[in-house]
Image (cartoon, helix red, strand yellow):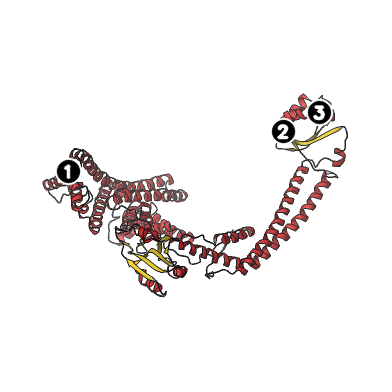
Amino acid sequence: MAIEKMKLVRVDGLLDRLDDFIVQCCINGDFQPEPAIQYMSASSKNLSLMEENPYPPMVQAIEELFSLTGYVPSEERGASQEREVSQDVLDCIQQVKEKLEVLQKQKRTCQRKIEEIEERYNQYSHFESLEPPLEDIKASQYIKIRFGFLPGESYQKLQNNYADDPYIFFVPCSEENGGYWGLYFTPHQAADEIDGIFSMLYFERIQLKDDTGTIKEIMQKLKSEAEVVQKELNQTNQSIEELWYQNKEKCTQVYSQLKWLEQVFDLRHYAAYRDNYFFYVGWIPERAVNEFTQKVKTFSNMKITITDPSKQDKIAPPIKLRNLLLFRPFETFVSMYGLPSYGEMDITNFVAITFTLLFGMMFGDMGQGAVLAVGAFILYKWKKLELAKLVIPCGISSMIFGFVFGSVFGFEHALDPVYHALGWEGKPLEVMDSINTVLLMAIGIGVSLVAVSILLNIIASARKGLWGEAIFSNNGIVGLAVYLCGVNVASAFMKGPSPIPSSVAGIVIGVGLVLLFFKEVLIGKFDHHPNWKPESWVDYSMQNVFELLEYVLSYFSNTVSFLRVGAFVIVHAAMMMVVFSLAGEPANPVVVVLGNALVICLEGLLSGIQGLRLEFYEMFSRCYQGGGRPFHGVSLAPAKEKQKS
């Protein structure tokens, strides 16, 4: 349960050495810069170092060059980190860009020609059955010809309503989608009237080019033209590939270098300056202080000041969690709720242990747990999903509780030989025959975890020096005493174990509730809060009556909420009973496999959701506040290999 200790670092030096300082000391991932001006007094006359970054236009130019090739630019591992890019290199890249633009223009021209030819070819293909040359069809001085598409219903109307009209003559050439491609003829003097009739019949007219020859001859010419243009396009593409093959390595290196320089220059904006001196401020983990100090000492005329975080700092220290590798995946859950504030307890390990146990109980099956663990391991190795790392221990926990419940893919007696070999009569717990036991165990687990959560809050408050909160709050010593004595009374009422006499427990509860009623006053007095006295005792009393009721109800609801753990244990066994009922006797293997797959997916998801709900609502709410901000150390080492889009 560790939060890395942070140190606030201030470095003063000559302004012309700022870039050297940033490159050597601030980009290895252990330094998070802060706006230095926020740590300077108003009377210091320091100014923020606001300069225009010269590198974005260069970066954009190379990105445009990459876009001409169809590649996505990315930083190349091991790229040069030289502080300048020579003008000769930039001129060379500009020449490459200009050549690529010319080739891309040729490529677009060829593509447009091919599209136009294909469109014309498709148009002519509808009229392939016409035998006369197209120029002869269009040559008539007294008749107009219209080419297009007539819907099937409109064609029937034309036949029924205008069959006797000598001026309306439609020639179908091909059929498509229930309609007809064809042409109609109309005398010049009746063209407007006939065009209007065909318009009402939803005739879709197309314009054919002034080509000559029969339709088949025209289509053959277009096909030949397309082949010529396609050949030109292929040659252009080959020229682009050859040009890019010759220059891609240089362009990628320059791009990586410019991106690096752009990011380094952006870090200058965190600095403040006065005259010829800069002031740089940031957070650094305590473990990295010595290395950072040694790097700064390599510069002459540079001063470093290292201080511990204090409540007077305008910006709270960032949070960097440090946990064992096994527990690290569960930092995701803590971050979802909110990182701990600096000085607060990191409960990642507590979450890892409790969530894993709760999940294993609710999803107790050796076979299904093994599938979950192995599947998560494969998924992590394949896709590097952090969530998959979290599922692996949950699957192992399911296997352990599956051994306790004696369940392997729903086969309730598959482990009987193992139990007999261990000298046992049978499985440790028969779920469906011990429903009351399972539910009571769930309540017992709830009592234990709620009590531990309150204890963690007491420890965390004491570490912060908030003794009033640690003692008198509903999640402090008084609250813990009231809760445990309440559990004791409830257990005695249900004829269960009651270590404390009910009379004594009742007295503790009464005194504790009185203290909780006045908790704001007591906490304010102990922790030296300003204005700890209530303005109106009447309002205070009315408000705290309801708050006291809320405390009691929350103790009850938080505990009862853990019944869902026992319920899911029972539900899991019941679902597998349903699967085997559907599988019949003897069990149909297909039904058993599909049933197990469904249970793994459905109940695995629900167990995870319910376990997370118990963490957030029943435990986090009692011992954890969050509100911290993550540590983002600047890391500008060249990143990934280039990738093709």
Q: Which amino acid type corresponds to the residue marked 2 in the rendered image?
A: Pro
- Identify the mark nearer the N-term, 1 or 2: 2
Left or right placement of residue 343 versus residue 247 in this view: left
Residue 564, image x, y percentages: 31, 46
Q: Which residue is mark 2?
A: 151
x, y (%) of residue 643? 57, 62
Q: CA distance from mark 3 to mark 2?
A: 16 Å
Q: Nearer the viewer, mark 3 or mark 2?
A: 3
Total of numbered circles in the picture?
A: 3
Q: What kind of residue is marked 1? A: Phe
Label 3: which secondary element: loop
Q: CA distance from mark 3 to mark 1?
A: 100 Å
Q: Residues within 10 Å of mark 1 (few under 14, many from 20)?
A: few
**Quadrant position of the C terminus in the picture:** bottom right
Residue 198 in picture, x, y percent from top left: 75, 30
Q: Residue at x 71, y 52 (%)?
A: 111
Residue in the picture at 67% in, 63% down: 241
Q: Report helix, strand or loop for mark 2.
A: loop
Q: Look at 22% across and 39% down and name the residue there.
A: 543
Using the image, tell me which numbered label, if any, was put on residue 168.
3
Query: Residue 493 shows which numbered tag?
Result: 1
Q: Nearer the viewer, residue 567 or 168?
A: 168
